[in-house]
Image: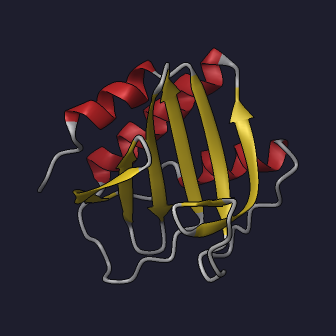
């Protein structure tokens, strides 16, 4: 199994700003989208404890991920910012995989498996921020 690229992991772990997105997997790309998926809502995770909980959940999801489906219909996204560097995760829990982007550029070999471990936390963060995350998909 491929590992998450070290640079992506480094930015994610050192990030000082984290944004969680709820995406429309079936929508048409718009000017203001997240890697070709329309943004239905977003929240900034400002509290250090919440940021750490998010990092822990994503790490757990990556560690537990093993089988990916052939589809890709992401409903969640994460942008982690460390100074001028960014790493984006476009996550499809239904398909058990995520794509990684460094500084808005895709990493072709970085579509990796992820378990559903972070899903509940991401949905809770979105809902606390006023974004009605659909828990059915």
**Spot occupied by residue 94 in the image (x, y as percentages of width and height):** 48, 74
Residue name at image x 82 percent, y 54 percent: 131
Residue 23 located left or right of residue 41: left
Residue 120 located left or right of residue 97: right
Residue 88 located left or right of residue 22: left
Residue name at image x 47 percent, y 58 percent: 90
| 65 is higher (above) or lower (below) than 29 | above
Residue name at image x 64 percent, y 39 percent: 19
As drawn, the residue found furthest toward the left would be: 1
**Spot occupied by residue 97 in the image (x, y as percentages of width and height):** 36, 64
**Spot occupied by residue 42 in the image (x, y as percentages of width and height):** 74, 49
| 84 is higher (above) or lower (below) than 109 | above
Q: Nearer the viewer, residue 48 or 80?
A: 80
Residue 30 located left or right of residue 129: left
Q: Quadrant of the C terminus?
A: bottom right
Q: Quadrant of the N terminus?
A: bottom left
Q: Nearer the viewer, residue 18 or 48?
A: 18
- Using the rendered view, name the quadrant where residue 50 is placed: top right
- Using the rendered view, name the quadrant where residue 28 is placed: bottom right
Residue name at image x 31 percent, y 25 percent: 10
Coloring basis for residues = secondary structure
As drawn, the residue found furthest toward the right would be: 130
């Amino acid at each position: 199994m491929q590992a998450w690229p070290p640079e992506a992991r480094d930015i994610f772990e050192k990030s000082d700003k984290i944004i969680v997105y709820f995406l429309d997997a079936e929508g048409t790309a718009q000017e203001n989208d997240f890697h070709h998926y329309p943004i239905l809502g977003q929240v900034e995770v400002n509290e250090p404890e919440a940021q750490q909980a998010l990092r822990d959940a994503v790490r757990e999801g990556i560690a537990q991920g093993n089988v990916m489906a052939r589809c890709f219909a992401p409903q969640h996204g994460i942008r982690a910012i460390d100074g001028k560097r960014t790493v984006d995760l476009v996550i499809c829990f239904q398909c058990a995989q995520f794509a990684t982007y460094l500084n808005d550029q895709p990493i072709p070999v970085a579509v990796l498996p992820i378990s559903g471990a972070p899903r509940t936390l991401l949905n809770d963060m979105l809902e606390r921020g006023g974004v009605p995350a659909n828990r059915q998909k």
